[in-house]
Image (cartoon, helix red, strand yellow):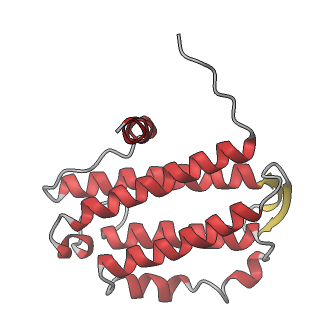
């Protein structure tokens, strides 16, 4: 029988975010092993290209980080222009897209480091769904779940294009971390 490891909410949140960034890095490493044009190749899927999936996840995480930092939805467009971002990703190299992700990760890590209470409830006025109360803990959990779902889209799109995907399962992350600690 194993030992019980009880994490406080902030430690749990950081573990989950570490898993998220590990998964993104693993995905980018895998995509770099494929021909560069794969990310811009059109396929019949939920998204037309891998780049559009990547920009969707990036865009969503950027918006929610701004919301968690206290910005109102009606002011976020000044920070994130969806059409400009989507069209620019149609031309960007995988390396440039990964650099955007790395900058966003640094911003998230700074935010999480400054967060003393991840269970703090935020009052958010969403333009479609109205007012809601939700904690930073649950919003970051949503973002991790959202990205996991779309990494699955990318795997399906890769298979459709004749390439293998890469496992980014949470248990694979922990096996990888345990292996690194033991070597």
User: Where residue 91 sits: x, y (%)?
Assistant: 31, 87
Q: Residue at x 75, y 66 (%)?
A: 68
Give coordinates of residue 13: x percent, y percent: 66, 48
Q: Residue at x 19, y 55 (%)?
A: 160
Side of 15 where 52 appears, left or right: left
Q: Quadrant of residue 95?
A: bottom left
- Residue 115: image location, x then y, percent: 78, 60
Residue visible at 16% across and 59% down?
161
In-image side of 23 versus 105 (left or right): left
Which residue is located at x 36 percent, y 54 percent?
A: 153
Q: Nearer the viewer, residue 100 or 2?
A: 2
Q: Which residue sits furthest front?
A: 183
Residue 44 showing in the rendered view: no
Q: Is residue 39 left or right of residue 142?
A: left
Residue 53: quarter of image: bottom left
- Up-down: is 119 above or below 39? above
Q: Is residue 89 above or below residue 162?
A: below
Tag count = 0
5 to 162, vertically: above or below: above
Is the residue 36 above or below the residue 5 in the image? below
Locate the C terminus by quadrant: top left
Residue 26 point in image, percent of width and height? 34, 56
8 sits to left or right of 62: right
Front residue of 75/96: it is: 96
Q: Is residue 171 visible?
A: yes
């Amino acid at each position: 029988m194993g030992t019980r490891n009880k994490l406080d909410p902030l430690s749990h949140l950081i573990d989950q975010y570490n898993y998220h960034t590990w998964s993104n890095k693993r995905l980018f490493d895998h995509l770099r092993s494929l021909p560069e044009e794969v990310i811009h190749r059109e396929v019949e899927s939920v998204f037309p290209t891998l780049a559009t999936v990547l920009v969707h996840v990036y865009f969503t995480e950027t918006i929610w980080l701004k919301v968690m930092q206290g910005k109102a939805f009606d002011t976020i467009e000044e920070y994130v222009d969806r059409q400009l971002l989507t069209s620019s990703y149609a031309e960007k190299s995988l390396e440039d897209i990964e650099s955007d992700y790395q900058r966003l990760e640094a911003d998230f890590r700074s935010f999480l480091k400054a967060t003393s209470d991840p269970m703090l409830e935020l009052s958010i006025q969403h333009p479609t769904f109205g007012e809601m109360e939700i904690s930073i803990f649950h919003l970051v959990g949503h973002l991790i779940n959202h990205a996991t779902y779309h990494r699955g889209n990318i795997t399906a799109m890769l298979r459709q294009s004749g390439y293998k995907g890469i496992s980014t399962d949470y248990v694979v992350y922990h096996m990888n971390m345990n292996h690194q600690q033991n070597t």
